[in-house]
Image (cartoon, grey):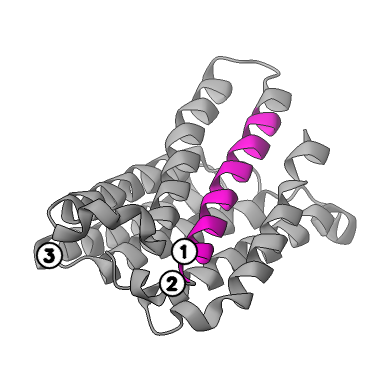
Amino acid sequence: MGDIRFLSKYLALVVLIYGFYNYKNYSNSKAKYFIFCILFAVVTEFFGSVFYKLFNHVNFVVYNVFTIVQLTFFLWWYQLILNSKRRKNILRLCILIYLIFALANCFFGEHILEANQIYTFTLGVLFVLIAISFYFIESFNKETILNITDSIYFWFSLGVLLFYGTFMPFMISVKLFLTGGQKILGVVTFVLNIIMYVCFAIGFYKSKNKNNIDVF
């Protein structure tokens, strides 16, 4: 599983470089924050792959911290790009609930050093899916809807949606029902990472036309 799964870090690195290459195209938009999320993912993937050699301990803590930070970032980013104050406030509440739950789960549930935090991951993904649905609701109510595929926000959202929307139920099923399903999970993770990062790359490509930056 590990060899296949961790190949995605090289794809992430390529997309990160491409994103920085195009950074000037979207540096004045809220999309600029997303590149640092990808940077964090790349650093985590490379650090996670050498963690055991460095500390002689399973790298649960690396990916547990990554999950909490990344999902919190997504919630923060969507409340930043949304227009509705009500939806913004809902996502801010989601962030608060999620962080409290994650902290409690670290110490009283699935220990951050000893196990994958399935409950923290699941709750965070559910909140992120709500955030993405808010984005699409606002997008569909705009006159720019016909040009939505020209938006860098659209491709970021589609990548996150396809990865987490597919990965969450699959991971839960492996955890609960499929004994020895880690190899399958590794392949699925790799494939979904390819899909997600391709979507991110398309978003960066679309940013070349600066008229697309303002397309919500």
**Magenta-drawn segment:** 185-207
Q: Using residue 155 as the reference point, say whether residue 35 is left or right of it.
A: right
Is the C-beta separation of discs 2 and 1 under 8 Å? Answer: yes
Q: Residue furthest right?
A: 53
Which residue is at a point 71% across and 48% down the rendered structure image?
A: 8
Residue wearing tag 3: 84
Task: From the top left corner, tell me how far across and down residue 190 is, in percent.
Answer: 67, 38
Mark seen at residue 23: none
Residue 3 x, y percent position in the rendering? 83, 39
Q: Earlier in the sequence, mark 3 or mark 1?
A: 3
Q: Nearer the viewer, residue 37 or 206?
A: 206
Q: Which residue is mark 1?
A: 206
Whether label 2 touches label 3, CB < 8 Å: no
Q: Callout 1: 10 Å neighbours few (<14), some, many (20+)? A: many
Nearer-N-terminus badge (2/3): 3
Query: Which one is in front, 38 or 113?
Result: 38
- Magenta region, mostly helix, strand or loop? helix
Circles 3 and 1, Cβ within 8 Å, touching? The answer is no
The residue positioned 50% from the left and 38% from the top of the image is 118
Alpha carbons under labels 2 and 1: distance apart = 6 Å
Judge the density around disc 3: few (<14), some (14-19), many (≥20) Cα neighbours within 10 Å: few
Q: Which residue is mark 2?
A: 209
Give the foreground label among 2 and 3: 2
Name the spot of residue 95 as percent of width and height, x first.
31, 61
Residue at mark 2 to residue at mark 3: CA–CA distance: 27 Å
Secondary element at tag 1: helix
